[in-house]
Amino acid sequence: MKTKQTIKLGISSCLLGNNVRYDGGHKLDQYILDTFGRIAEWVPICPEVASGMPVPRGPMQLVGDVAKPRLITIETGIDRTDELTRWIGIKLRELEQTGLRGFVFKARSPSCGVHDTELFSDSGKSVGIRAGLFAEAVMSRFPLVPVEDEETLRDPDIRGRFIALIMA
Ligand code: SF4
């Protein structure tokens, strides 16, 4: 049962066990659910499915300029950047009204990654890491809202800071 202290947190939908990943599966993270379950009211978001992409779908990666990468399907080279970006613009306006106190995103995803999404050159060479496109947009629009991924939240110091911020 939720208490008065329930806090609305956005979360990558696949971490809740929803089958929204490119391969039709999920990435249920029981640790995150157990750790935050008593205080969190989860608001699941899957940017790729919500922007109209099917399940399953071809895996994608970020390609090109680190400041303005494109979201490209790995096997077929289709550029999905514009459809995702259009949806992000609409979603950010909606989130301004939702009052989320924090986000838990899926590490390394080209859409949801916070710190460690791989960036590739046009020739397919790994050239760095950055945030995924949706997580980056959230952090830019809501700079005071704490954002972490399911892996960084394993770190006791990072987790403690995150909890203090979402409860402040
Ligand atoms: S990482 Fe993000 S975009 Fe990918 S399946 Fe999970 S919620 Fe959807």
Image (cartoon, grey):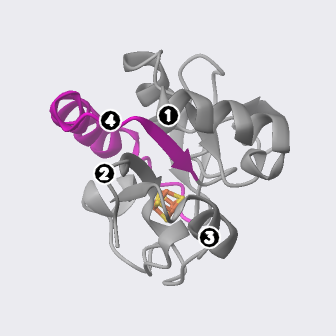
Query: Can you identify the residue that label 3 sits on?
Result: 34
Residue 36 lies, with reference to residue 83, above or below; the image says below
Query: Is disc 3 in contact with disc 2, using a CB cutoff of under 8 Å?
Result: no
Image: magenta residue range: 76-105
Residue 4 tag number? 2
Residue 83 lies, with reference to residue 140, above or below; the image says below
Query: Is disc 1 in contact with disc 4, using a CB cutoff of under 8 Å?
Result: no
73 within the magenta span = no
Specify the amino acid type for callout 3.
Answer: Asp
Query: Can you identify the residue that label 1 sits on?
Result: 166
The kind of secondary structure element at disc 2 is: loop
Query: Can you identify the residue that label 4 sits on?
Result: 85
Residue 57 tag number? none
Q: Please name which of the two marks, 3 or 2, marks the residue nearer to the observer.
A: 2
- Residue 84 in which image quadrant: top left
- Residue 63 in which image quadrant: top right
For marks 3 and 2, give the CA distance. 18 Å
Which mark sits nearer the N-terminus, 2 or 1? 2
